[in-house]
Image (spheres, rainbow, N blue to C red):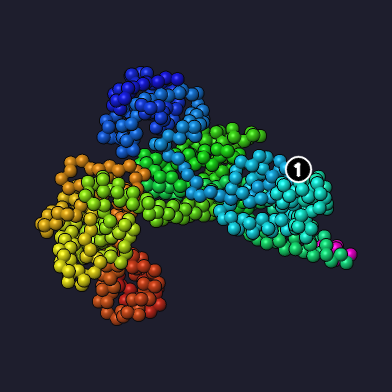
Amino acid sequence: MAMSTVNADDNRAAFKPAKGEIPTSPGVYRFSDRHGRVLYIGKAKNLRNRVSNYFQPFERLQPRTQQMLRLAAAIDWTVVSTDTESLLLEHTWITRYKPPYNVVFKDDKSYPYLAVTLASEAPRLIVTRNEKIRGAKYLGPYPKVRMLKQTLQLLQQVFPIRTCNDADYKRAIESKKPCLSGQIGRCNGPCSQRVTVAEHRDMVQQLLQFLNSPNPGLAKKFRREMLAAAEAHDFERAAIYRDRLQALQQLMEENSVVLSLDTNADLFGLYGDEFAAAVHQFIVRGGRILGERSWVVDLDAADSQESLMSAVLQTAYTDREPPKKIYVSLPPADGEAVQQLLADKRPRGGKVSIKQPARGDKLRLLNAAVKNAGENLTRHRLKRTNDLTSRTDALAELQAAIGMEVPPLRIECIDVSHLQGTNVVASLVVFEDGLPAKGAYRKYKIASTTDDTDSIYQVVKRRAAQILAAQDELALKELGRYRDRPQLLIVDGGKPQVAAAARALSEAGITDIALCGIAKRLEELWLPDDEFPVILPRNSEALYIVQRARDEAHRFAITFQRQQRSKGIRTRLDDVPGLGQTRINALLKHFGSVKRLAAASEEEIAAVPGIGTVTAAAIAKALR
């Protein structure tokens, strides 16, 4: 172990290790603040090369790294022998210290499990969210507790093991009087006096075997027992097996086969962008999905998707045994080391294989996992947006960052869209109290422009005229809520776009509306007349609102631009001799979109019913 310490000064030079002090071996390093709190933990195949990156010119570092280094006061490292050891030590330290600047996957929600309490004299099957019941066998997690309770009822019909709690069970054993469930035949625990403890445990083992790998032969057994009881005129017993058979058939239908019956594997699908990511896990046993789980994480610009997959594989098996086969939507970073780390978690040993399938049922199921991850990420964002407290805090944070006198309760964002300099349009979207006000969105056509900055200038100038017109009370009534005065105007772009917008506001004499631009490269905010941008933390709620406004303006502008292109092509089609509205609609219906029609050959156009070769040639000429 080596350490470089520092006093309260957070200057990197104060704790920068001496040249040659850091070894070139694999290892794990950590940054701490002056109070000893661990800020960040990382691993490296070559400690010297990796740690040296933190002492390059400050402006070259990612904003999140800059923020961490401003707080850092010490760095220490531990040398290990192999990449696998460094991966294990990194994970152990992150779990122990929970550093704020490391990516930490969070469960999107808590999940219910089916648990069999094997430590009890007479085990019972329960639905629980407690993952620490001593001696319990867990199955799941499952996505919805309501569906799980329905499954529990069906399982108890097929395998009528004990259902009562420990106190009721003890009371029934001592008094030799079964509980109500035992009296009506819903519970076949030892307390019902129908089976012994050993027979009850045999039934529990049958239940576990069915849950791990549902066996169609059990249905044949129930059918034989039912028919035998009916032939013996024991209709009460026949009815019991009939009900069990129906419950079993319903269970088999709900738990359909997705992979081959001998497949025991976990599948992880990752979906994300530069700001956040989600991972969805399918737990497959005996070819059937027996559980699923999701994680959501906010990202830093330096995080790669491969490193995220590596992190989530370690997170998923913190307190669980991994299966022998794991399928992923993309290979994890340090794949061999992760495989060895997971193999060490298997109590009986054996290899763990991590693969990315290229075709077949596994790829289809993996694509479903990626789709579920996308849905989970969308729900996570909507939940975050709909949180009133988060929105209030975000607006206050944005107010402070930009230096506004009042919080931006109404935000307007402008974006420009064009197709290689033609069909230039712009959009204006409105956010009120941090939420989109879609009724106030507006579109702009720009007839002539020189570049994006000129387009921004024209749109802001027109918007400024509308704001001035709205100052008159009568005009306000006519123009409606769209003409309400914003506290903040955002433009999509950096310093040049902000300067153009500021010039338009200045020429209109408007000085009480704050202005900023958001640049895509580092998601920094540019203010008028400021030499350097404002950089908000990547997990900032204020940055999230600005990004969402920018993305919504971008989406709205692109949609409008495509509509204009579609109208332009329709106008050109109107000039084709003999081509009326009916045949134009037939063409668009056949090709599915204007883009595909414009890219089609004359032969493909002529193949549309009612369109001959002459007309097809005229259409192709008109579109090109």
Q: Quadrant of the C terminus?
A: bottom left
Q: Residue at x 46, y 37 (%)?
A: 333
Mark 1 lies on residue: 121
Label 1, residues with CA under 10 Å away: few <14, some 14-19, many ≥20: few
Whole-percent x, y for residue 67 in the image: 32, 35
The reply to whether residue 367 is visible in this rendering is: no
Report the front residue among 301 and 588: 301
Q: Identify the image quadrant of residue 595.
A: bottom left
Say which residue appears at 39% left-offset and 49% top-offset.
273
Of 136 and 13, the residue lying toward us: 136
Q: Position of residue 372 (x, y in %)?
A: 49, 54
Q: Is residue 229 magenta?
A: yes
Question: What residue is drawn where x is 38% and y is 54%?
Answer: 388
Q: Is residue 399 left or right of residue 77?
A: left
Which stretch appears magenta?
A: 226-232
Q: Is residue 178 visible?
A: yes
Height in image: 349 above or below 295? above
**Main secondary structure of the magenta stretch:** helix
Q: Please say whether residue 460 is one of the residues in the magenta stretch.
A: no
Specify the quadrant of the image occupied by residue 71: top left
Q: For this view, does 330 lie left or right of residue 448?
A: right
Residue 495 sits above or below residue 433 on the image = above
Quadrant in which the N terminus is drawn: top left
Q: Is residue 568 above or below residue 83?
A: below
Residue at the location (36% across, 73% down)?
587
Q: Give amino acid for label 1.
A: Glu
Give the percent coordinates (x, y) of residue 579.
30, 79
